[in-house]
Amino acid sequence: MNINTVNLKRAFYTLPNWVSYLTGICKPYPVGYNIICITKRCNLKCKMCNIWKEPPSDDLINAPILARTISNSTMLSKIQVAVFTGGEPFLRKDLSEIIIELFGKTNTNRVLIATNGVLGVKIIKDLNAVFNHKSSVGKQVSIQISLDGIGKVHDRIRGVEGTFGHVHSTIEKLKELKTCYRNRLRIGITGIFQYENKDDFKNVYRYALNNDIEFGCGIIINTEYNKVKNSKYNKSLLTDIKEEDLTGLSEDIKDALINWLSSEEKIGKMRCFAGFNSVFWDTNGDIYPCHHTSHLNTYKMGNILESDFDTLWKSENANFVRSRVKKCDIKGDCMLGGCNIASQKVQYCLPHYLVKLFTLGKIDLYKRLGYYG
Ligand code: SF4
Ligand code: SF4
């Protein structure tokens, strides 16, 4: 993370979260990430996810509700990044309208969309609509595409034949679009390391490098829709990795994978700031600390269709949920994964900067604490 004014401002806002976490005296600011489940519908049938088996649910939060809730909230208006997850976000007909509303009516200046990348034509249509709208000037959209293998490997993991071909074609289109919009469009690939792709993972990394696209990796983590007991799965995967599986990956990616796969005990001792510095919206307006708790009623902080966000965030119930987060019993399964890792990194950015400064860059506190990626 580079030190710039935006990051310094975020670092400053993390202080109330530390005080709140350690003493409960003041209310935390959710300055890390605003993670919004935009739809639970999906057009794939991935092995590591069961969302597509669930009965369809209504997408109750829409562009006006999102923009109004965020702009009326002192807390939420501090967050400049919105993360859209799902399901498959591009199945929403009004996705471009939602982004335009957020850019036009809130302080959001970056929207990150996690997508399976299959709906190439819709992705390009939505992005053109956003970038051609005046509210998006100076704002950025990041498209984070899931890619777990090349050709049949990806198709097998994602459960639908032809998926890799669609993703590849979307990436080609996005690269072309980037020549028009440059820094306003960011493209990334995320690969999930698992048994099915352990010997093909390096090829995904190489594919990203060859296409000049940022690459991020992850491991299987437990979510509402993934009932794998992942701590056992990951331990066993770690034992079965062969040296040649990792050959060709960068040292950082190797480090991150090995550490994540072996970090169950370490994760158990790490602090979780979900519900302090980050917030998760379900499609029906329910608010939770994180994705992983969003199927547990005991972690529900409230619903933004029934209350304004600041009242909800400061409520006794939200405080009670935060006390549960501090001793969360599913931490070993969630591995503090996905966006939570990113928001934990935001929470530790101030100590990280200070350690970096005083050790002349020799000590990386994030790595020492186990926050890779
Ligand atoms: S992992 Fe993503 S793309 Fe796959 S079924 Fe789940 S939501 Fe859909
Ligand atoms: S430990 Fe994991 S499941 Fe529990 S609140 Fe934190 S991110 Fe969510």
Image: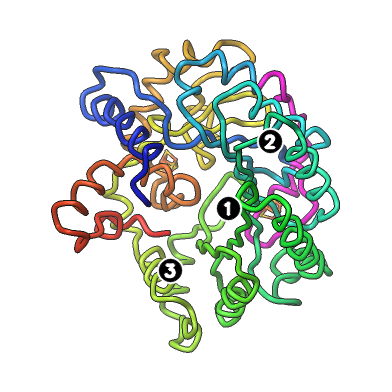
Q: Is mark 3 within 8 Å of ligand 1?
A: no
Quarter-of-image position of residue 47:
bottom right
Q: Give the percent coordinates (x, y) of residue 130.
A: 74, 38
Q: Which residue is mark 2?
A: 38
Closer to the observer: label 1 or label 2? 2
302, 3: nearer the viewer: 3
Q: Give the percent coordinates (x, y) of residue 370.
A: 31, 57
Identity, as a three-letter code, of the amino acid under mark 2: Ile
Q: Earlier in the sequence, mark 3 or mark 1?
A: 1
Identity, as a three-letter code, of the amino acid under mark 1: Lys
Q: Give the numbered dot on residue 257.
A: 3
Q: Which residue is mark 1?
A: 227
Mark 1 and mark 2: span between their CA atoms?
21 Å
Quarter-of-image position of residue 322:
top left
Instruction: Reply above or below: 17 against 110.
Output: above
Looking at the image, the residue that sits furthest to the bottom is 244
Q: What residue span does the magenta drawing correspond to?
A: 41-66
Mark 3 residue element: helix
Q: Earlier in the sequence, mark 1 or mark 2?
A: 2
Mark 3 and mark 2: span between their CA atoms?
29 Å
Mark 2 residue element: strand
Mark 2: give few (<14), some (14-19) or many (20+) Cα within 10 Å.
many
- Is 24 left or right of 58, judged from the image as shown? left
Identity, as a three-letter code, of the amino acid under mark 3: Leu
Quarter-of-image position of residue 56:
top right
Residue at 85% over, 53% down: 121
Instruction: Reply above or below: 77 against 345.
Output: above
Secondary structure mainly formed by the magenta segment: loop
- Is 1 left or right of 84, judged from the image as shown? left
Instruction: Reply above or below: 101 against 264.
Output: above
